[in-house]
Amino acid sequence: MPKMPAPSDAIADWPSWRSARAWAARFVGWAVDTEGSSRSSALIRIGLAMLFWSRWAGELLLYRDQSPAGLFLATNFFAATALLFIGYHSRVAAVWTGLVGLAMYYYFGFQLGREPWTHHHTYLLAVAALLIALTPCDRSYSLDRYLAVMRAERAGLAPPAERGNLWGLRLIVVQLSVLYLFAALDKSNYAFLSGARIEQIFLWYYAGSDYPAGLAWPATIVSVAVVALEYCLALG
């Protein structure tokens, strides 16, 4: 009498189960096993430092808040973001910058009541800085890269490759996808899709008190296009 396969073996032989395992293996390979150029990570590292400066550098100049907490925050902010920008100990600088951002969001924003610092973009930038620390952002366009090349030349070795694991970039992609998805869901209502919100923004910032003729249809088209674009960015 032939031996019956164990239930686990039988399940493993199901075509749907095999395809699910193959899909899961491909996903894991894409998510955590992909290696590629480190230059994109380095450019994001530089861009994040510039975003931190453009948003908060003016508010954190040392003369603005000379309390011990204010001076401590400003010193850490400029030291961390400067190191992140030039790429010296890049990953440590990224973690440092992210922790400064979280301190601004939770302690200075919610605890001390600096309301603009409680906005979602503060949290997103802080988390993005932490995530970029999981990438090979130190291997290109950085002082770390320059020092590594100099060490290799002194040792008579080839320069280190500008490559690394990109799973940190995948996490940033997930972060942005979630952001765009909920932004699109928030706009998926009649008030936005009808063009009313776009009209209000246009009148407030550009048109003054007079309602320009022919604004309704362009506003509706732009509103629908914005929502469609955000869904594409989230799911594409």
Image (tube, grey):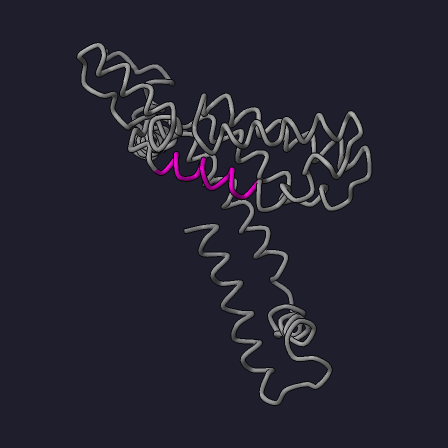
Q: Position of residue 210 (x, y in %)?
A: 70, 86
Vertical arrangement, residue 198 with respect to residue 216, above or below: above
Extreme residue toward the bottom, this view? 213
Residue 39, picture quadrant: top left
Vertical arrangement, residue 38 with respect to residue 150, above or below: below
The residue closer to the viewer here, 138 or 6, is 138
Q: Residue at x 78, y 36 (%)?
A: 110
The residue closer to the viewer here, 107 or 55, is 55
Q: Residue at x 59, y 40 (%)?
A: 124
Residue 121, picture quadrant: top right
Vertical arrangement, residue 17 with respect to residue 199, above or below: above
Q: Residue at x 32, y 26 (%)?
A: 164
The residue closer to the viewer here, 85 or 24, is 85
State left or right for residue 126 relative to residue 204: left
User: Which portion, as a residue range, is magenta?
Assistant: 40-52
Q: Residue at x 65, y 79 (%)?
A: 207
Q: Is residue 50 magenta?
A: yes
Q: Position of residue 211 (x, y in %)?
A: 68, 85
Q: Position of residue 80 (x, y in %)?
A: 56, 27
Vertical arrangement, residue 23 with respect to residue 216, above or below: above
